Image: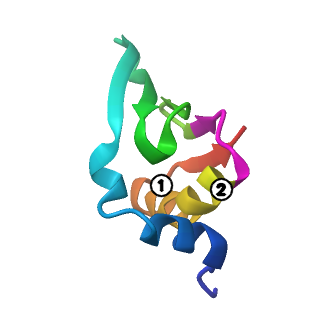
Amino acid sequence: MNSRKYPIALAHLKRRERPWDELSLKVKELGSTQHAVLELSRGLLAGVEIEIGTNEITIKHATAVQERLLAQRADALARRLGRSVRFV
């Protein structure tokens, strides 16, 4: 399978010096049932919420540009963890 290319999203990333270093993460909920909700509050991915469950990882509230930036990493994460990754 060919890897996806997103030239507009990649150009957005290149405009910044170190965009991934600007991320700020807040753990909203961490349960004893291996379930966590993480909220990104600063930087390029501000407003994105990541819900990690035992069977799947759900990425919520991402804009179209944020989805494109995360798409390749989400595919790799799904393969590595053996869980489905979906955007809502």
On screen, residue 64 above or below 4: above
Look at mark 2 in the image and give the residue it sits on.
Answer: 65
Q: In the image, what residue occupies the spot 39% across and 62% down?
A: 16
Q: Name the foreground residue: 70 vs 23.
A: 23
Indicate yes or no whether the magenta region holds residue 59: yes
- Give SS at disc 1: loop
Which of pointers 2 and 1 indicates the residue nearer the eye? 2
Residue 17 picture quarter: bottom left
The part of the chain drawn in magenta is 58-64
Q: Is residue 69 left or right of residue 76?
A: right
- Give SS at disc 2: helix
Q: In the image, what residue occupies the spot 59% across and 39% down?
A: 59
- The amino acid marked with disc number 1 is Gly
Point out which mark residue 47 bears. Answer: none
Counting every numbered tag in the picture gives 2
How packed mark 2 is, by other alpha carbons closer than 10 Å (few <14, some 14-19, many 20 or more), is: some
How packed mark 1 is, by other alpha carbons closer than 10 Å (few <14, some 14-19, many 20 or more), is: few
Query: Contact, CB < 8 Å: mark 2 with mark 1?
Result: no
On screen, residue 83 above or below 2: above
Residue 79 screen position, x and y as percent: 48, 63
Q: Name the foreground residue: 15 vs 86.
A: 15
Q: In the image, what residue occupies the spot 54% across and 57% down?
A: 70
Residue 58 screen position, x and y as percent: 60, 37
Residue 45 screen position, x and y as percent: 49, 43
On screen, residue 72 above or below 5: above
N-terminal label among 2 and 1 = 2
Residue 78 screen position, x and y as percent: 51, 57
- The amino acid marked with disc number 2 is Val
Look at mark 1 in the image and give the residue it sits on.
Answer: 82
- Quarter placement of the N terminus: bottom right
- Quarter placement of the C terminus: top right
Indicate yes or no whether the magenta region holds residue 38: no
